[in-house]
Amino acid sequence: MVSFSILQDRGLLTVSGADRSSFLQGLISNDIHSVTPERAVWSALLTPQGKYLYDFFIAEFEGRYLIDCEAARLMDLGRRLSKYKLRASVDLGKEEGMAVLAVYGAGVGKYFGLRENPGEVAAFRDGIAFVDPRLVDVGVRAILGKESAKAALESIDLEEVAAESYDAFRLGFGVPDGSRDMIVEKSTLLESNFEELNGVDWDKGCYMGQELTARTKYRGLLKKRMVPVKIEGHEPSLGAPIFCDKRQVGEMRSTRSGLGIALIRLEYLERAISGEIKLIAEGSVITPRKPDWANF
């Protein structure tokens, strides 16, 4: 079954103007020049020290960039970007007439004429649909007019389900969801799997926070990884410490329906996956899994 969920927790910023590409290129972790009417990307904005601030999807639509980001932090992101405008010919705005939806299930791409390549975009009704640039298995994101979005997707025989269903679906693949899974001014891109999930471009040149990100990769400094976990017992709170015996080896991120994401030290991860050791968070057993897309 292919379903869709309206993501009320997402909002849309717009970036337009003659300098929109060069403006974003010096700030974000991915290559803005790869964003075209045919391709969208997932990217991040970091602190100068290379720590996570925001992550978002970027698509091009009607001559401007649409930035699909957390609704609760949308205005904060807009203010942050405004600080870097200087004399650039860039206009920042908020798109209030469109909604973000997640569409997922086996063969979802065919409903939009997509071949299911990461980030592939297709026009659909009064907006666009694109394959999730992070991981094809997570499905398609659609940006459509708020008033017509639901009817447009129901007209192609898709069924609406609660956003919580989509949340559990993406947790099964271990794909992070913004500041629920990444800690602002603390998390790094590589421990959050941005490399495997197509969120960082190593050839684009300098951007804010690039130096630490590159040094972590090329010097092999990574000590922790974010992975999907199965929870036996109650779902631990966000940030709950994970213990092996009495030693803290990680911490929990978002959870739902017995699934979750956790950040775990690499020296314990393989042993926990094999069952050699047991991990506990707030009395619940936490069993990590290495997702198919991971190469660590």
Image: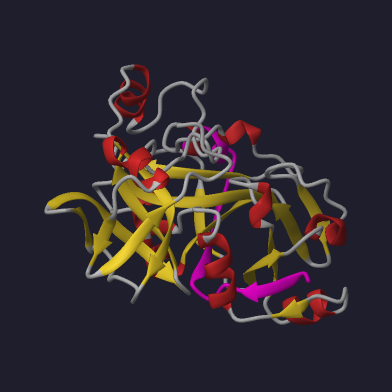
The residue located at (28%, 55%) in the rendering is 279
Q: Position of residue 220 (x, y in %)?
A: 32, 21
State left or right for residue 74 relative to residue 294: left
Task: Tell whether position 8 is magenta.
Answer: yes
Q: Residue furthest left?
A: 246
Question: In the rendered image, is residue 64 in sight?
Answer: no
Q: Residue at x 73, y 64 (%)?
A: 105
The residue sitting at 83% across, 46% down in the picture is 115
Q: Is residue 256 magenta?
A: no
Q: Residue 293: percent from the left, percent from the top?
A: 57, 40
Quarter of the picture containing the N terminus is bottom right
Question: Is residue 49 positioned above or below 242 on the image?
Answer: above
Quarter of the C terminus within the rendering: top left
| Left or right of 51 in this view: 34 | right
> In this orientation, which residue lies closer to the viewer: 144 or 274?
274
- Camera-side residue of 73 and 230: 230
Residue 39 sits in quarter: top right
Q: Nearer the viewer, residue 98 or 119?
A: 119
Q: Is residue 60 above or below residue 162?
A: above
Q: Is residue 21 above or below residue 255?
A: above
Magenta span covers which residues? 1-23
Q: Residue at x 45, y 69 (%)?
A: 71
